[in-house]
Image (tube, rainbow, N blue to C red):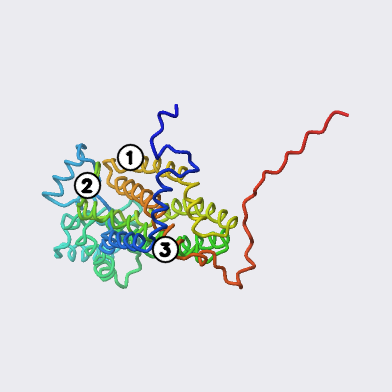
Amino acid sequence: MNRLRIPILGRESDQGGIWSIITGWVLARPVPLASLTVAGLVALTIPFFSMNLGFNAGADALPDALESKRALELLEDHFSSSLISPAKVIVDAADINAPEIQAALAALIETVGNNDAFLGPFDTITDRAGTVTRINVPLAGNIDDDESEDAVRLLREQIVPEAFAGLNVQTFVAGDTAEGIDFRDRMFSSAYYVFAFVLGLSFLLLLVMFRSIVIPINALVLNLLSVGAVYGVLVMVFQWGWGIGIPGSEETGIIETWLPLFLFGILFGLSMDYHMLLLNRIKEEYDKHDQNELAVATGIRLTAGQITSAAAVMVGVFAAFATSRILGLQQFGLGLAVAVFIDATVIRVILLPASMKLLGRWNWYLPGWLDWLPRVTPVDEAPQAIPAPGND
């Protein structure tokens, strides 16, 4: 059976295979390799700053083979997708049929009818109790474009408040476009808390685990470089249309609003998993021999097989999502596949050993005022089993 092993890659796991050779090469020239790698990741990150977030709504969100997509494309080409999902003005009052409220409704319909941002007809529906009215207001733009978002904001901030000023009513503006605006605003407002929580918790866990303030900072910087590069790749492929030959990829001009924050959490969890496994072996070797470079080389050699195998499985699984005809799944799958690939190769094999070689003993620096932190050490031997009591 050993004759079926792949040369170099099929060596015993404790020898590290090709990764051990690459690690030795990296440790021999850390400055140029780290500089080139960081420059490459930063270059991949630059497109992130032009990321256009939105929802793939209407025909864009559906596979080409569906009949419903062809019907939606006809509507969008000759009318507007917002005819299918217009903005909805909701009016809640004690008596919707009161003369002053009916006058306000008529004034509202007249105002939107005279504005090019809206299309008729403006259907009005009142519930049986006569307390709630819904006015459908089709938008001139498509569901997810800037023109429609501006129109919804105009309804919310100016047209509707002015029409019902001084009346004892509650008004709301809903619809797919309004929901997209609300979702994006809420996501942005909570993103800072998510980033702070993930980064802070990761820092604290690594600080306690390795009793060092340098190891956590280095790990967070490397992970942020990886995440930024993934964001940039998504923009280049799905927003700019580069690499559309990738199976399943399709230019959309936007990145799904939910994706960056969602990817950030998952990617940090996956990358920290690799880092914890690798850094733990490096720390064990450093504690044994007190030699930083030897510890780095040995740690990578001993974990190469596990990390590479796990990464290969995950890349394959996530790449399968990227071949989906659902655009959100395409972006999700490609993002995760690229992230795992970068983290398991570029970060683990080049940047991590190079940076730890350059930092030397500073890797394990802990200020004296933090010496109270608990010492988390692996258990060398399993506890012995207590023999069963014999029969008296």
- Is 183 in front, or is 275? 275
Could you tell which of marks 1 and 3 lies nearer the N-terminus? 3
Mark 2–mark 3 CB contact (< 8 Å): no
Q: Which mark is residue 250?
A: 2
User: In whole angstroms, how far apart are the C-alphas of marks 1 and 2?
Assistant: 15 Å
Q: Which element type, helix, strand or loop, lies under badge 3?
A: helix
Q: Amino acid at mark 1?
A: Ala
Query: Considering the image in quadrants, where does the C terminus appear?
Result: top right
Q: Residues within 10 Å of mark 1 (few under 14, many from 20)?
A: some
Q: Residues within 10 Å of mark 3 (few under 14, many from 20)?
A: few
What whole-number distance in Å separates the C-alpha atoms at marks 1 and 3? 29 Å
Question: Label 2's element?
Answer: loop
Occupied quadrant, residue 239: bottom left
Query: Hey, what amino acid is under mark 3?
Result: Val
SS at badge 1 = helix
State the residue position of label 3: 221
Q: Please name whichever residue, 220 or 65, is drawn nearer the observer in this view of the structure.
A: 220
| Residue topped by disc 1 | 320
Picture coordinates of residue 48, whole percent (x, y):
29, 61
Q: Is residue 334 left or right of residue 198?
A: left
Residue 135 appears in view: no
Determine whether, in the image, residue 289 is placed left or right of residue 26.
right
- Relative image position of residue 391 (x, y in whole percent): 85, 28
Image coordinates of residue 129 in percent, x first then y, are 36, 53
Q: Earlier in the sequence, mark 2 or mark 3?
A: 3
Is residue 184 positioned above or below 68 on the image?
Answer: below
Mark closer to the observer (1, 3): 3
